[in-house]
Image: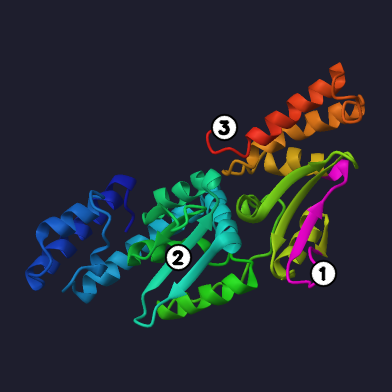
């Protein structure tokens, strides 16, 4: 039998209310209001999480949530957001499971980059607070609905071996299959999220170079970046307890800014420095970096340095 679009919609709505009526009659612990408001998208709580909900409702809810999640995941913009979140979690995030089986996701960043944490909070809930010494800010998420959404969002997008191990334990706790990490592509917003947490862009006046870097304790994650974005990975200290991915050639730096970060904007204050890089190269080309400080060119470089440093301020 063939149905028109309106007919299919009517049939779907009718099925929803039949399930609601059945569940209300068989499950007095779940109120009419809770179910009706959920299926009308007025409340966000999944009815499968409500006490006393029947298996029928749980199965029906799962189908609805899976369909909605699938449609959401196909949206290019949403995929970019999820890739960015995966990069942030791989950089400064941490999954923790308590002895009682409670899961917490935390992300700690510098105060100037608090916008990143609020962007994550807006999507999942949770809290953003200063740490005890007020030298950093921490995002915390521990309610089940938020954690489950994080699992759906970043499953298959985590690249950091350390974070992936933590994530697998969380998935096992919720009986969710861990999707193998997808191959990193150039246009993925993952790098912008990783850069927001562990990245840096700075210049060296003597060598007249700009450096775009990402630092990690291990090199496994950084090695993944090289075949996709170029650059090199080197030990950043004598004991080889930390490593740095670096892009320093002028042509590579400009290419990365124009062709990647222009389309995959960072959320942190670091994004402001990208707009100043080309001006640094211009000042270098006209001799401003080596000019006397009291000369016109020298003063222009001093002015540039002040602009560069203001990007480190929270209110700039």
241 magenta-colored: yes
Camera sees residue 250: yes
> In the rendering, which numbered label is found on residue 259?
none
Compared to 156, does 87 lie above or below?
Answer: above
- The answer for how far apart the CA atoms under marks 3 and 2 are is 29 Å
Which is more toward the observer, 245 or 20?
A: 245
Identified at 53% across, 75% down, the residue is 166
- Categorize mark 2 by other alpha carbons within 10 Å: few (<14), some (14-19), many (20+): many
Of marks 3 and 2, which one's residue comes earlier in the chain? 2
| In this rendering, position of residue 12 left or right of residue 153 | left
Residue 316 numbered mark, or none: 3
Q: Is residue 250 above or below residue 238?
A: above
Q: Nearer the viewer, residue 2 or 204?
A: 204
**Residue 132 % position (x, y):** 43, 58
Q: Which mark is residue 238?
A: 1
Which residue, given by chain and number where applicable, does mark 2 sit on?
105
Question: Which contiguous range is marked in magenta?
Answer: 235-252
**Percent x, y for residue 49?**
25, 69
The mark that comes first in sequence, 1 or 3, is 1
Vertical side of 169 occupied by 211: above or below: above
> Residue 293: percent from the left, percent from the top?
85, 24
- 59 with respect to 257 (left or right): left
Mark 2 / mark 1, whichever is N-terminal: 2
């Amino acid at each position: 039998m063939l149905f028109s679009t309106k007919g299919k919609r009517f049939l779907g709505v009718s099925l929803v209310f039949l399930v609601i009526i059945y569940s209300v009659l068989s499950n007095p612990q779940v109120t009419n209001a809770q179910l009706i408001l959920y299926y009308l998208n007025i409340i966000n709580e999944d009815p499968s999480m409500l006490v006393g909900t029947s298996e029928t409702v749980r199965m029906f809810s799962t189908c609805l949530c899976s369909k909605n999640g699938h449609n959401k995941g196909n949206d290019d913009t949403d995929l970019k957001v999820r890739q960015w979140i995966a990069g942030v979690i791989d950089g400064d995030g941490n999954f923790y499971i308590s002895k009682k089986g409670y899961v917490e996701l935390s992300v700690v960043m510098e105060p100037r980059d608090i916008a990143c944490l609020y962007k994550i909070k807006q999507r999942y809930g949770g809290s953003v607070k200063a740490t005890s010494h007020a030298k950093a800010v921490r995002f915390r998420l521990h309610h089940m609905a938020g954690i489950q959404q994080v699992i759906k969002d970043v499953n298959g997008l985590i690249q950091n071996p350390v974070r992936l191990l933590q994530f697998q334990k969380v998935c096992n706790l919720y009986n969710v299959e861990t999707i193998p990490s997808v191959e990193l592509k150039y246009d993925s917003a993952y790098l912008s999220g990783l850069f927001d947490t562990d990245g840096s862009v700075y210049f060296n006046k003597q060598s007249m170079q700009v450096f775009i870097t990402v630092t990690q304790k291990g090199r496994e994650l950084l090695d993944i970046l090289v075949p996709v974005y170029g650059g090199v990975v080197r030990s950043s200290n004598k004991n080889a307890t930390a490593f740095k991915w670096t892009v320093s050639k002028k042509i590579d730096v400009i290419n990365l800014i124009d062709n990647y970060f222009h389309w995959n904007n960072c959320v942190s204050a670091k994004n402001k420095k990208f707009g100043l890089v080309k001006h640094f190269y211009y000042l270098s080309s006209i001799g401003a970096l080596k000019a006397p400080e009291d000369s016109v060119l020298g003063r222009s470089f001093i002015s540039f340095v002040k602009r560069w440093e203001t990007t480190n301020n929270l209110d700039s």
